[in-house]
Image: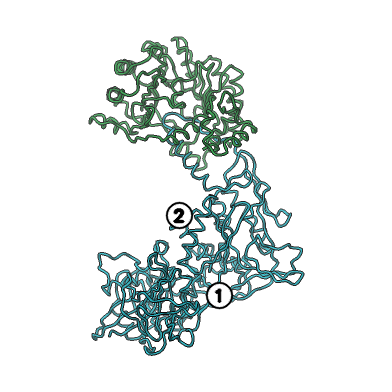
Amino acid sequence: MADSGLYVHVPFCASKCPYCAFASCTRSGHLAPAWRDAVLAEADRRAGRFGTFDTLYLGGGTPGLLADDLLAGLVTGLRRALPFAADVESTIEANPADVTPARAIAWRAMGLNRVSLGVQSFDDDDLRFLGRRHDASQAAAALVALRDAGFANVGVDLIYGLPGQALATWRDTLDRALSFGPAHLSCYGLTVEPRTPLARSVHAGRIVMPDESRFEAFFLETSRRLAASGFVHYEVSNFAHGLLFASRHNGKYWHHVPYLGLGPSAHSFDGARRWWNVRGVEPWLRRLGQGRLPTAATERPTAEQRRLETLALGFRTSSGVVLSILRATPGWQAILDAQVADGRLEVADGRAVPTVRGLLVADALARAFA
Amino acid sequence: MAERRNFSIIAHIDHGKSTLADRLIQHSGIIADRNFRDQILDGLDLERERGITIKSQSINLPYTSKDGREFELNLIDTPGHVDFTYEVSRALASCEGVLLLVDATQGVQAQTLANLYLAMEHDLEIIPVINKIDLPSADIDMARMQIERDLGLDGANALLVSGKQGTGVEELLEAIVERIPPPTGEVGDPLQALIFDAHYDAFRGAVAAVRLFSGEIKAGDLMRPMAIGKAYKVEEVGVFRIVREPRPILRAGDVGYIIAGIKSVADTRVGDTITMDNNPAPIALHGFRESKPVVFSSLYPVASDDYESLADSLERYKLNDASLVYTKDSSAALGQGFRCGFLGLLHLEIVQERLEREFDQSLILTAPSVIYKFTMEDGRALDVDNPAHYPDPAAIRGGEEPYIRASILTPDRYMGAIMKLCLERRGVNSEIAYPSPGRMDIKFDLPLAEVIFDFYDRLKSITQGYGSFDYEMLDYRKGDLVKLDILVNGEKVDALSMIVHKDRARARALNACERLKEEIPRQQYKVAIQGAIGGTIIARETITAFRKDVTAKCYGGDISRKRKLLEKQKAGKKRMKMVGDIEIPQSAFIAVLKTSDDE
């Protein structure tokens, strides 16, 4: 069996972005030491059934905010508590504003070998709209610092489809990102998540989101441009400069490989059961402090539920879905033929694999075979 | 022996009839308080939920008057809806008096008037009762005045009660025994028992609720419902005291039940007279009428495999509802189903809801239709209640459709909106009366077909619930009747076809197209929805293709949520019907039967 993934949720941010729905808080930095100790405590209690880990992913929140010594203590503590493979992929998510040459070197020294940098855009107007703490020049400086520190595997996160954004502006952002030679790009269409300030603005009519046909244009242009630069479009929003640089950690989520999530709101899957932790930092700390597991809920997907998950996840990736999974659907062959004829799926090596246009309607493909 | 008083309560929906009945039942002490639940007479879940009575029942209440006399009061409950006017009339025929309930906050409504006229036809003693006097908005003087002006009754004589709080119930019971005359009828004459209600008991068969006008009946007798002509041996007689309470004998003047091993309520028709097989009454009590369906719709199972199960459910349902008629039907879009006839639109909704709830059926209904009459060029006459049987238009000489006389009672501020609605629905011969200041009685001749298409809901909505509606059937009138077809992606969906008046065809077609556009999920390609008469397209909407159907992010925390959504969508697919390549959800078939709220 493949090695497991380890995710650590860092629930701290310096500021909240108006579009973000992830669990984080801006006024609890003083809880960081307690949080670190509790993550290690949770690791001890949950480690048993996961075997060896070949990924460590520090996500959030803003992991790059953590002070070097605190972070070093966390990483060392995890290595002591859990078995890791020799070639572990260790990722930290960071905001360009927090990346200095010294800190980049410190991260390398801790054994982190991959950075996912939340650049989002190289256009300062875009960055202001997105409520980011950094500007384009800081993003460039951060990328240089990471390269100079010796990070060979840097991922750049970008967002497109902002209200009123011109395709040319987005092309410039993509080109600027490519000029730094990143190994990986995540390009997300801006999504209105419920209960965010962005959602309220859209609801109130203060902001008008681009329509689907504009979104489609951005999506196709992104895929085309990155393919021309040697990037594999291996997931709806993810591109790797050769599949070697595909996010090993995120692949666990998409292929039913076990992963352990530590920290508030983190999700886990041990191969049979899924569970997720309570969302708030303080309730999560309290539970562990009382010697209890901070689990909010557990589920054990049935075989049919696993099949539906495979459909929902598989059509989002360039590996697609094996035909044996599709055969459970009444009339599957006709459905498949229609999708192939319409250019959304291709059949190769016993798998139904989405085309770029197929990725754009991955949820509809899953529904068609549900 | 205790004296008898047989009475009924007539009231508009929501005027508190069931609550008042609850108080009378509680006062009688036949049921311990701890076992009491609200609206105890309304046996069906549906009735309790909607707060209306669908099936009438009776209850036998012991009462000792202030002067020490013993009584058995028979309260005969009546259905509170215009579709069931005939059932109401049979219930009233079983009484000597009625309590006419008027809501102190709302005053007299159309239904109250209609039922009052029924009570007057039966020459009943009428006791006006003003209810809900406990509410802050109660206007007792207004209610009294309306009772005098609108109803022509003595308002000063009205009793004041609060069914909710129990105020005035003692006085009401005294008034019942004082004012309502005792039943007459000779025990020695041949048996005449009027069936005013019947329901089906899985163990005992049909249970007929009866009022004896003459003679007597007991277990072992050989009785005969006169419209049926078959004899049955009586197994048990008794009275309803929430549960059945067997009695050795029922006599002239009594209200109770008869069980005689009858397999279906079809043999205990409401309005029929039960007599003795060996000593029959010379004639039946007058007024028996076969209930005739006026509204027709086809029922289809959402999943074609469920056809047998639907057939079985309809058969079992009909044991309890003789007024439902049905035959087999089939549709290219929906497969095998049943064409059903109903007493009215509410009856249709009741049947649908009970089949879905009690028999666990998932149904698709086609657009309700009335019976249209066509005269053909060759002189033949043709009755058509199903758009599938609409004749070749070239062979039609003329068509006719049924009209009703609608009576709408409303506060006068809604007059403009009501006039507009009725005129839109091809109303003619309007007549307006002002029964009391601020209130109007608006009368219209309306095609029944217009009334069964979302008329009640529209009326309720434009009058904010204050308008009340009643109708009687009038006659057939000439009309230019066409068949409107609905096409989805070029394919005719036969289950959506309807016969409509030519003047209304375009409005109906537009409405259907708009509603379908809202209900049919977007596809990966553009879908046209069209309304057509013959080969002519008269309305069109387009469902645009979706360009994007994917979420940007899907990581560890999103998987369960994504799967749950997919599970829900998968379940929804079972409730879809394929027409060509397009999946049409069940909700779409329902939506076309309604107008949009902003019409």
- Going by the numbered disc 2, the residue's amino acid type is Asp
Colour chain A appears in? green
Colour chain B appears in? cyan
* Residue B485 location (% of width, % of height): 67, 56
Chain that bears disc 2 = B
Res B12 quadrant in image: bottom left
Quadrant containing the N terminus of chain A in the rendered view = top left
Residue A276 visible in the shown view: yes
Does label 2 or label 1 sit earlier along the sequence?
Answer: 2
Question: What's the mark number on residue B360?
Answer: 2
Q: Secondary structure at mark 1?
A: strand
Above or below, A356 against B293 in this view is above
The CA span between labels 2 and 1 is 34 Å
Chain that bears disc 1 = B
* Residue B396 location (% of width, % of height): 74, 67
Q: Which residue is mark 1?
A: B472
